[in-house]
Image: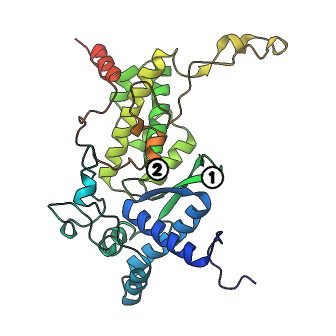
Amino acid sequence: MQHGRKLLRLQGKSPHNMSMMRNLVSALLHHEQIKTTYAKAKVAAQLADRFITLGKKNTVNARRTCQGFLRPPHRETAASKQHHKTPPPGPIGYPADSLDPETFDPPPTLFPKVFGTLAERYSERAGGYTRIVKYGRRQGDNAPHAIVCLVDGPRDVLFEMAARTAGREIAQYVTSTGAGLDGITALSDDVENWEGLADLTRKNLAKALKYRDAEAKRDLVRKAKEFADTVFVEEKALNGHRRPNPEYENLAFKDRSKESNPYVGKRHMAGERMSGMDVRHTGLGLARGDLGKIFNNRPKDRRPRFLSEAQVASAPV
C-alpha cells in the first residue's frame, strides 16, 4: 500500500537515496542551480521547497529539522583555489556579515541563507520556489537530464532565456520595420509595451518579473537589448532573419516540391552559440552554472568584437 509515500521512489537502497538527496538539496540551496537526472531533479526540487518553507516559518522545530537534514555547503580551501586559473566567484545569496572577508568562503552552515536570504526573497510567494528545465539526455545511459534552479534568483534559467527570446523577436521586428540598431537602442524600459513579441514570450516575461524588483527589470532590459544586437548583426550576415520565401508563396500548390524552401534566412534559437560568442552565453553555459558568476579577468563589455565594430560603423558621423 502507498501509505506515507509523498516522494517519488528512486532505485537503490533507502540510506543511499537519503544521503544523495541531502547532498542534492544542500547543493541546490547553496549554488541555486544544479544539473542532475530528471527523476532526481523532481525529488530534490520537492524537498528544497519544503526547507524553504521551513525557513519562512523560522521556528525551533524548523531549525532542528534543517539541522538534521542539510549538510554544510561546499568550501574552497587554499589548496583547491591554487588549481583555478581565475579565483572562483564568491558565494551568492549569503548575508554579508556571515562571510569571511579574507577568503570569501561561505559559512559552515546553510542557516544564514535559508532562514535569511531565501526567506526574505520568497516572503510573498505561497510556494513554487524551484524550477525544473529539461536538458537533453546523458551520454552513456541516455538518462534524461534536467536543470533545477531557484526562481527569482541570479541563476534563474527562465529569466535569462526569456530575455534572450525577447531580444531575438525584437531583432526580427526591427528588421521588418527597417529601424535597425537604432530601433533596438531606442527601446524603452517598459517591457509590457514592447511591440513584436509573441504571446508566450510576454507570458514568460511577466512570470519572470512578477516577484522581482525594479533593478531586475532593468537587468532584463539590458540583456534583451544586448542579445537583440547580437542577433541583428549575426543574422544580417547570414541572409537576414528567417522569413517566408515570397517565391515559394507565389508557386501553385502542385508546383511545390521538397526542393523548394518555404523560408529563407537562418533561424537562431535563444540558447544557440553564434560566431564570436563565448560558450558561457549559450545553453551549455547555463547548464554549467555560469549564470551569476563574476569573471574578473574579462572586460565589462562581453559582446563579440564584430558587434562592437558594427555599432561603431553604423553610428552617425
- Report the quarter where the N terminus lies: bottom right
Q: Please give the name of the residue rendered at 69% of the width and 85% of the height, measured from the top-left corner.
A: 3
Residue at mark 2? 157
Q: Nearer the viewer, residue 316 or 141?
A: 141
Q: CA distance from mark 1 to mark 2?
A: 18 Å
Q: Position of residue 216 (x, y in %)?
A: 33, 51
- Report the quarter where the C terminus lies: top left
Q: Is residue 291 above or below residue 26?
A: above
Q: Is residue 81 above or below residue 113?
A: above
Q: Position of residue 276 (x, y in %)?
A: 39, 25
Q: Nearer the viewer, residue 179 or 70?
A: 70
| Residue at the limit of the structure toward the bottom, as seen here | 60
Q: Position of residue 60 (x, y in %)?
A: 36, 89
Inspect this view and state whether residue 126 appears: no
- Badge 2 density bin: few <14, some 14–19, many ≥20, Cα 10 Å: many
Inspect this view and state whether residue 314 appears: yes
Q: Nearer the viewer, residue 103 or 286?
A: 103
Q: Quadrant of residue 112?
A: bottom left
Q: Please give the name of the residue rendered at 56% of the width and 22% of the height, measured from the top-left corner.
A: 266
Please tell me whether mark 1 sits on a helix, a strand or a loop. Answer: strand
- Badge 1 density bin: few <14, some 14–19, many ≥20, Cα 10 Å: some
Residue at mark 1? 144
